[in-house]
Amino acid sequence: MATGNNTKGYETPNHPFQGERIAEEHGLVDTYGLKNKEELWRVQSQLRSFRREARDLLGSVQMDEGAEDEDEEFLARLKRIGVLDDGDELDDVLSLEINDLLERRLQTVAYRKGLANTTQQARQFIVHGHVTVNGARVTRPSYTVTVNEEDAIEFDENSELADELHPERAEGQ
């Protein structure tokens, strides 16, 4: 018997057959090495959630200390995952793009660090358990990497890819 909620973590597009949107989604799926559009829709839903929370916090009429604390917590959370910079305010959340969130996925960060030649190869290394974050093996390519964890992404010491002469290692890595 399964437990937990039965809702999916994303919304599908309202108009399924729009050529321009489909082409844009396909480009993002290719660029970031996503498995399918469902992964993209999950990130889009997360972005909508961030924007909704920012609008709610901006729209709260009474700016008592509780609301200011919520603002700071929300901004700190987004800065911790690297979506916002230190000087950014609540208004900047509304101008976030889908790319800002896709760049924080473990798959993309591992590729940008040079652990793999392509985003698809980075995905494979992660799923096969060759990549660790802070010494812990992570097998979810969608894992959101915090700013503090970025430098601690490396090959697992027990992985055959830890050998610098392995043929699948990225050039120059």
Image (cartoon, rainbow, N blue to C red):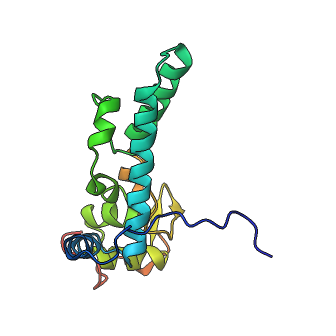
Q: Is residue 145 visible?
A: no
Q: Quadrant of the N terminus?
A: bottom right
Q: Is residue 61 above or below residue 173?
A: above
Q: Residue furthest right?
A: 1
Residue at the image point whose x is 34% and y is 75% from the top: 16
Q: Is residue 66 above or below residue 7?
A: above
Q: Quadrant of the C terminus?
A: bottom left
How far across and down, in percent of the image, does residue 12 sit?
43, 69
Q: Based on the displayed image, in which of its 4 quarters is residue 169 positioned?
A: bottom left
Q: Is residue 10 visible?
A: yes
Q: Nearer the viewer, residue 113 or 109?
A: 109
In this picture, residue 7 sits left or right of residue 140 = right
Residue at the image point whose x is 34% and y is 74% from the top: 122
In this picture, residue 22 sits left or right of residue 46 = left
Residue at the image point whose x is 28% and y is 85% from the top: 167
How far across and down, in percent of the image, does residue 59 sit?
42, 27
How far across and down, in percent of the image, does residue 67 sit?
51, 22
Residue at the image point whose x is 27% and y is 57% from the top: 99
Q: Residue furthest top?
A: 64
Q: Nearer the viewer, residue 103 or 110?
A: 103
